[in-house]
Amino acid sequence: MKKTDIRYIRTEAAITDAFLELVSEIGFYAITVKDITARADVSRGTFYQHYNDKYALLSSFEEKIRTDLLDALMPGRIPFKADAVKERVIRMFVYCEENLKMMRALFGKKGDAEFQQRMKDMLWEEVFAQHINYAGLAKKLDVPADYLREYVNSSHYRVFQTWLEKDERESPEEIAEIYLKLSVISPLNK
């Protein structure tokens, strides 16, 4: 069956929807292919036509998020200027808001920690890292640069997760403003 065939597309949607629901309900580590196929109402053979296992399915989400976010953050892959960090942060949160079910499942407490770490690092590198002079800031603060980077990166990520968990979230523009006020980036760009 071709990937453009409507049956293939519907089956793919059923599998991915079932996966996200199960991650939210019972957690990534507890999910089996049997759980996914039962929820999606497809056979194991059909599942294996799409994915080798649940890790391959998770990997497909990682690639989707990476591609989508890079497209949102750098339309046409044209880099932003250093003073456009806020615009990048807003675009990141707009994407998350538009894909809330997926983001909550994958980045929530029941998601895969290794996936979350890889995505946290990718987001950090694409949105913030090039705008911070770690050597200079670390020297100014008298702390090692690697600790500073991890501290800032982890703080940003926890703010992101807190926003995702809220039922009544701030708008992408509001959370971007909060995000930047809480970061070391904002004072450095003034």
Image (cartoon, helix red, strand yellow):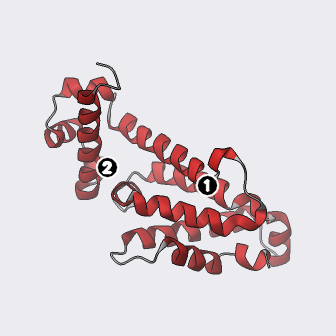
Residue 18 is situated, as x and y percent measured from the top left of the image, at 23, 45
Measure the alpha-carbon separation of dots 2 and 1. Answer: 28 Å
Residue type beneath disc 2: Phe
Q: Residue furthest top?
A: 1
Q: Residue at x 82, y 75 (%)?
A: 142
Residue 183: image quadrant is bottom right
Figure check: 76 above or below 48: below
Classify mark 2: helix, strand or loop.
Answer: helix
Q: In the picture, which quadrant includes the C terminus?
A: bottom right
The residue nearer to you, when weighing 119 against 82, is: 82
Residue at 75% x, 80% y is 187
- Whether residue 175 appears in this view of the structure is yes
Task: Assign a secondary structure to mark 1.
Answer: helix
Q: Residues within 10 Å of mark 2 (few under 14, many from 20)?
A: many
Q: Position of residue 134 (x, y in %)?
A: 79, 64
Locate residue 40 relative to residue 72 in the image: left or right: left
- Foreground: disc 2 or disc 1: 1
Q: Which residue is mark 1?
A: 73
Residue located at (29% from left, 50% from top): 20
Q: Is residue 44 above or below residue 32?
A: above
